[in-house]
Image (tube, grey):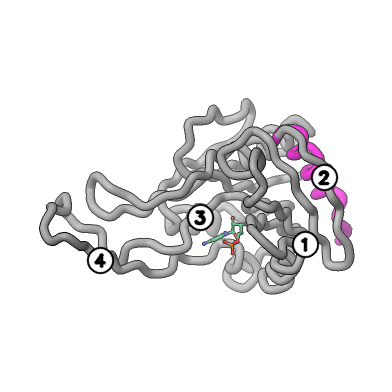
Amino acid sequence: MKFLITAGPTREPLDPVRYLTNRSSGRMGYALAGAARHEGHEVLLISGPTTLDVPAGVDFIPVETAQQMYDAVQDMIKGVDVAILCAAVADYRPVVCAEQKIKKQADKLVLELERTPDILGSMRSVFGFEGKLIGFAAETNDVIAYGRDKLVRKKCDMIVANDVSKPGIGFDSRENEVVLIYPNHEVYLAQDTKEHIALQIIEHATIIPS
Ligand code: C5P
């Protein structure tokens, strides 16, 4: 099968030397890419900036901004069987990126932000993607309810949800504990390394019925 996986944070520039970003390490997405390749699949990884090595045998497109990630996914989605959108895409970006470095001036500086394009939400409606679609949901409360709502709204086949308020898992850590949310049931995966969780997610992803 052909997999497309997004990973990592995005960087939204403010001026030539500054940007808005988040704490995503990219580990979960890179582990998914490695696991899918290990299982013999063709894998394209589209990732924001991380310090990680691209797993061997995985095709790779590096991007920085949410817009660049959106464009790369749109360009590459044809022929993909399974898309796993794991990137921690910035929800907002500065309305303008200053051409020169912003100078210190008043005591307060107000930034105007606008929404970034919703890649997961565009997969069915804009890109016409008809393969298996898997999204991630990082929540701090009501994990199942929010995850299920996202599953329906974004027309996903599965949402991988985790509770990011729990210490030692999720963002910036080596381990994760997730719930796979399907239209009619849930599967709990116990806390484990992101590599082991990734293998289980890939196994589940490949057996989603058409
Ligand atoms: O709504 P929320 O940002 O929590 O949704 C998370 C899911 O949506 C993840 O799968 C993430 O990769 C994806 N996403 C996206 N484009 C955005 C924001 C989130 O693809 N602009």
Of circles 4 and 2, the one toward us is 4
Residue 43 shows up from this direction: no
The amino acid on which the numbered mark 4 sits, given as a three-letter code, is Val
Q: Which of marks 1 and 3 is nearer the N terminus?
A: 3
* Residues at circles 1 and 3 in contact by the CB criterion of under 8 Å: no
Q: Which of marks 4 and 2 is nearer the N terminus?
A: 4
Q: Mark 1 points at which residue?
A: 157
Classify 10 Å Cα crowding around label 3: few (below 14), some (14-19), many (20 and above). many
Q: Residues within 10 Å of mark 4 (few under 14, many from 20)?
A: few
The location of residue 48, given as percent across then percent down, is 47, 44
Q: Judge left or right: residue 11 versus residue 72.
A: left
Residue 208 image offset from top left, x and y in percent:
85, 55
Q: Residue at x 20, y 62 (%)?
A: 108
Residue 172 vs 166, above or below: the answer is above
Q: Give the alpha-carbon distance from disc 2 to disc 1, as whole Å.
A: 17 Å
Q: Name the residue under label 2.
A: 189
Secondary structure of residue under mark 3: loop
Is the Cβ of the residue at disc 4 closer than 8 Å to that at disc 3? no
Q: Name the residue under label 3.
A: 89
Query: In x, y percent, where is residue 111?
Result: 28, 64
Start and end of the magenta stretch? 194-210
Q: In this view, does 98 lie above or below 8?
A: below
**Which residue does the numbered mark 4 point to in the structure image?**
110
Q: Is residue 210 above or below residue 57?
A: below
